[in-house]
Image (cartoon, rainbow, N blue to C red):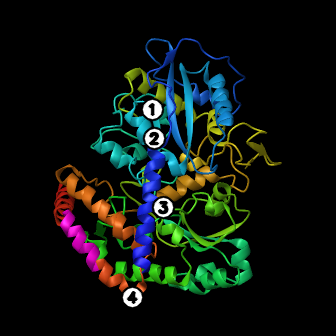
Amino acid sequence: MKKKLLSALLVAAMAVSTLAGCGSSTTETPAADTTTEAADTTEAADTTDDAAAADTTEAASGDVVNINIYRASYNVAQPDSAEVKAVQDAINEYIADKINVQVTINDIPSGEYADKANLALANNEINLLWTASWMGTIGTNDLYKANAAYDITDLLPGTTLYSAMPESIWTASRYDGKDLFVPVYKEAYEGYDLKFPEGYATEFGLDTASIKELKDLEPYLEWCKTEKGLKYPYLAGKTPMFFRYYIDKYDFFDGANSLFAVDRATDTVVNPTLTQDYIDFCTLMCEWGEKGYISEDEVTKTTSDSEAQSQNWGVNWWTCVPGDESNSESRDMQEEVFVEGFTGKYAHSTTTLGSCFAITANSTEEQAKACIDFLGLLYTDNTVANLYTYGIQDVDYTLDADGKVVQNNEKYGHSAWESTSVVPLTLCAGEPDDKVQIYQDMNGQAKASCAAGFRFNVAPVEAQYAACTNVFDQYGFVLELGGYAAADVESIITEYNAALDEAGYQDVLAEFSKQYEDWKASK
């Protein structure tokens, strides 16, 4: 009964999402818009501005080029359009005497971002697009397959942007040897933590260091449910987690879901959904669903993206980054959290693209150069980085006694991970003074994954791959978020794999294996 109910709810939720996307309006600023009038200049910043004033590509015509930017808002559920415009105007005023570029910023609620950005992309209304390797429908793989990203390989050398990051970061980010994406310079590895509100963990007496496997959380989850009445004892945030929690055993090089992986022990491509690990994980998740540790909101995709900012959860997953606790507190506005490492850290083909920008293929060369110029400032100039990330000082954030940022995230506010390089930003309250050095050190400590550098070309089996992804959404998503009866998990996985095979899974698996073996032989 629960299986049927949740399947129906999921279909309904997806239908609502689709309708919302189709009915959304987009900014009507043409992607090709240019103007010859520069805004007034302002006083230069006193930090990294000299570096940012280095040579840029500059539009050959000398005219000011307007670029249309789309970005997702995670910290503010509904960005205030007037405040976004104020931030945009402040940026344009500041950069007017530095580069021949003006920007139009579209700040989209994260839950609506994929639909609205895809629609705007189809209408040629975007020049600079924020994206990520893990995003659905508008991620780096999607843009690559659609030839929607501008090849900036020949435009980058000698620019401020290119020199703003180590060569190794650019190398790891390439597709077919081409620069199609601009990574946000942050942690260049993948790893996952468990995050706990300090108040709840302390009240319960939880020893976070003793959590070695997910099942160890159960006494705490039961307490969160029965004693505290939390709606989300375990908050997944609509995120299936097998391909994250199990990266110590598998390299999920596709970076999209749990359908394909390299087994680290054998260095071969396998079907993870047929492993005992997958059975055990899905069984545990479904047991948690039955016990009320996982809300049905997760399966129906109705959990709010800003839920982590509430006090209504007991444990949440967190992407491993230097300064985990302070980063989490800043992004999710938690006063205090405990963050405990759960997996190892691995550098592989998608880790540098966990947050990045794409210049759209519909842009002219002049617009592409303008985007590079703007990103060069964004990645090196303290004033531009602060405005784009935090907003306007004394309106969207203040500085504490130590000169560190305290955000209010009421009308405008973003985090470093989805905005700019960690290097030029003013630190947030609670962040260590040596944050940049910590990032550089931790990037150097990550283990090189067995499949690092391998990228799968889906073209030979594109139709089958898309069909398998749809099957994952029907079965895998629900399994990994506890939407079935625990007693039915093994039979559902059998049914799941039968549906995958019908969709052409074996063709995709064989192609993955062939390409991986060929890649190994070519090294």
**Residue at the disc numbered 4:** 487
Query: Is the C-beta separation of discs 2 and 1 under 8 Å?
Result: yes
First in residue order: circle 4 vs circle 3: 3
User: Residue 351, position in %: x, y?
Assistant: 42, 55
Identified at 70% across, 67% down, the residue is: 311
Q: Quick one: quadrant of the C terminus?
A: bottom left
User: Which of label 1 and label 4 is nearer to you?
Assistant: 4
**Residue at the disc numbered 1:** 126
Viewer-nearest residue: 448 or 324 = 324
Identified at 49% across, 46% down, the residue is: 113
Considering only vertical position in the picture, is 434 above or below 216?
Answer: above
First in residue order: circle 2 vs circle 3: 2
Determine the CA span between mark 4 and mark 3. 42 Å
**Residue at the disc numbered 2:** 117
Q: Amino acid at mark 2?
A: Ala
Determine the CA span between mark 4 and mark 2. 41 Å
Determine the CA span between mark 2 and mark 1. 8 Å
Circle 3 crowding by C-alpha within 10 Å: few under 14, some 14–19, many from 20 = few
**Residue at the disc numbered 3:** 445
Identified at 74% across, 49% down, the residue is: 408
What's drawn in magenta, residue-wise? 494-505
Magenta span contains residue 498: yes
Q: Amino acid at mark 1?
A: Ile
